[in-house]
Image: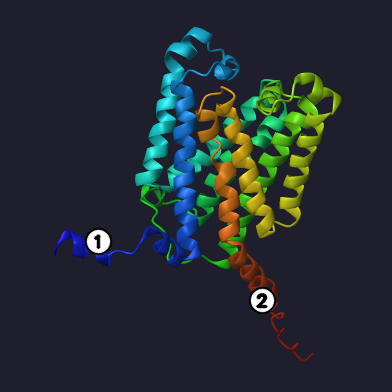
Amino acid sequence: MSTSTFLKGRKPLRETIAEASVTTRLYWLLRIGVSIEFIGHGWAGLSRSRAWLPYYDLFGISPDVALNYLMYVTGAVDIIVGLLILFWPARVLLLHTTVWGVFTALLRPTVGEGWWEFLERGGNYGMPLALLIMAGWGGWSLRRWVERVDRPAAISDRTLIAMHWAMRGGLAMLLIGHGGFGAFEHKRYWYDFFAFFGLGKATVDSANLMVLVGGFEILLGLAILLKPWRPLLLFVLVWKLGTELLRPLVGQEWFQFVERDGDYVLPVALYISAAAYALARRRASAEPVSPPAPTAPAAPA
């Protein structure tokens, strides 16, 4: 068979994606998203981000040891995990990414950075948790934990509903957390974001722009919790892409944008699964309640 004949027989990527089931699209979206998240986080470690120093200090590790040794180790492990999930997505890796996402997010309030930091990383643990729920628990079987988890042919309504809330909760938290940076913490680097649009510090402070923008993001997160309409999810996707792209545009490292890819993956995942989730909820609510088992007649006296 010639190359041209082979290529003619292949469907375009857009058509292949359009024809794929919701389960297939969710699986690949989450799998690639978790992989990129950990590669981005590992990139931060290999870049020896000084923002990580307080986390090592919490465990009594000196800055010299952290910068010269452990950051390389942490970064390399994260990148290896990200690549393994891309090529061999075992349940143990999905459990690791979920627990590690929660652990690293909890380090921030532990060292005094505030709970908004934990919430803002909601995508870092909400996204791998959703993929772990899709893969299913490994139980007591070691083989099930280390075997490759391929795309399931189908998932139950209960699994889809659980995945939905992992994704929805993660997206809501990251919006609320990021909004808290402006509304309550007045992060200094937010002035750089406003300056990108020609707004100086005096203008930002006099117009309370940090509070307004931060409060708006908090409302977005609450709206996602209440009702994640498809138009709202599209708006959140555009909003997060735009606001997070400001990081490299004002001089921050690109890994800051890459490691937050859950901010962009979760709105898309919720959008493409919205109809399936609504159907799963209707079916779950329509399930008849099992009648009580009949009791045996009493024995005659």
Per the image, the residue denoted by label 2 is 287
Residue 156 on image: x %, y %: 54, 66
Residue 91 on image: x %, y %: 44, 48
Q: Element at badge 2?
A: loop
Identify the residue at horizontal 60%, vertical 35% (top origin): 244
Identify the residue at horizontal 41%, vertical 58% (top origin): 151
Identify the residue at horizontal 64%, vertical 36% (top origin): 243
Residue 114, placed above or below residue 101? above
Q: Nearer the viewer, residue 266 or 90?
A: 266
Q: Which of 77 and 200 is in front in this view?
A: 200
Residue 191, placed above or below residue 163? above
Q: Which mark is residue 7?
A: 1
Q: Nearer the viewer, mark 2 or mark 1?
A: 1
Residue 105 on image: x %, y %: 61, 32
Residue 111, placed above or below residue 175? above
Mark 2 to mark 1: distance in Å? 47 Å
Identify the residue at horizontal 67%, vertical 27% (top origin): 193
> Could one spot residue 239 in this view of the protein?
yes
- Circle 1: is it few (<14), some (14-19), or many (20+) Cα within 10 Å? few
Residue 184 on image: x %, y %: 80, 29
Q: Which of marks 2 and 1 is nearer the N terminus?
A: 1
